[in-house]
Image: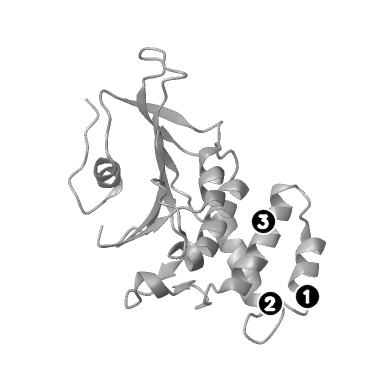
Amino acid sequence: MGKELTFRMSKQISEMSIKPLRTREEAILLLLYTIRMFDVSIFLTDERSEKVKISIDKMNRIFYLLEEKMFSMQFPFCIDDSSNQDNIIIYDNITGTIINPMVVSFLIEAFEKMNRKEMDFETIFEIIMEPEVNDNDFTTKEMWLLISHLLKYDLGYIRYDIDSEHENGRMHPLNHLDICLDTAATYKIGLDKKIEFDDFKNILDITSECWYIC
């Protein structure tokens, strides 16, 4: 999958990742808070086993690695290939907008309100028109395009679980993949053994050989 960046999870991201994601808004908020974490990740003092990885190639994917599960989504932005992990530059390919702390804060506020079902056209307009947000470096058009992009892009959500609590033979295998985020659309693929991160990554890597369902 080309270039790969690895970060230790902050306590906040670890707690958010452990909880099941039920809606697009929850998934987007996890992504946005993770981007905010990148600036402080190298300063984390505890040696957490939980990690976040971003693989950059034809498919940009972000991976969340926890003790009993791993899950992945498409990463909606681009990362400057010339940057290093201590000073990464994230930008939106459509608008060219640099996803800096101000932009991340704006998007988090918008999606927090959406997640609480408090968002409508008027509320979005009020957020956009706030003086500390609306300036020459981050235009109203860019705000609309970023929100629209995050609301519409394909999350490509997939999760690998080791689920001893709900294990039930072939109905709910111990090791399995959960596909899709929405509970109305999700489905399960059973696995006959435990897989590691490299296996999980290879399942999603279009440049590697396919896995087969037998």
Element under disc 3: helix
Label 3 sits on what residue type?
A: Phe
Find out whether the residues at labels 1 and 3 contact each other: C-beta distance under 8 Å: no
> Which comes before the other along the chain, label 1 or label 3?
3
Crowd around label 2: few <14 · some 14–19 · many ≥20 (10 Å): some
Image spot of residue 59 (x, y percent): 34, 58
Image spot of residue 148 (x, y percent): 61, 62
Label 2 sits on what residue type?
A: Thr
Res 107 → quadrant: bottom right
Mark 1 or mark 2, which is nearer to you? 1
Query: Please, is residue 107 above or below residue 93 in the view?
Result: above
Residue at 41% x, 17% y: name it.
167
**Residue 4 versus residue 211: which sits nearer the camera?**
4
Crowd around label 3: few <14 · some 14–19 · many ≥20 (10 Å): many
Q: From the viewer's perspective, is 49 left or right of 154?
A: left
> Which comes before the other along the chain, label 2 or label 3?
3
Element under disc 1: loop
Residue at 56% x, 40% y: name it.
21
**Residue 104 visible in rendering:** yes
Residue at numbered disc 3? 111
Find out whether the residues at labels 1 and 2 contact each other: C-beta distance under 8 Å: yes
Residue at numbered disc 1? 129
Q: From the viewer's perspective, is 158 left or right of 195?
A: right
Mark 2 or mark 3, which is nearer to you? 3
Res 200 → quadrant: top left
| Quadrant of the frame with the N terminus | bottom left
Residue at numbered disc 2? 140
Element under disc 2: helix
Crowd around label 1: few <14 · some 14–19 · many ≥20 (10 Å): some
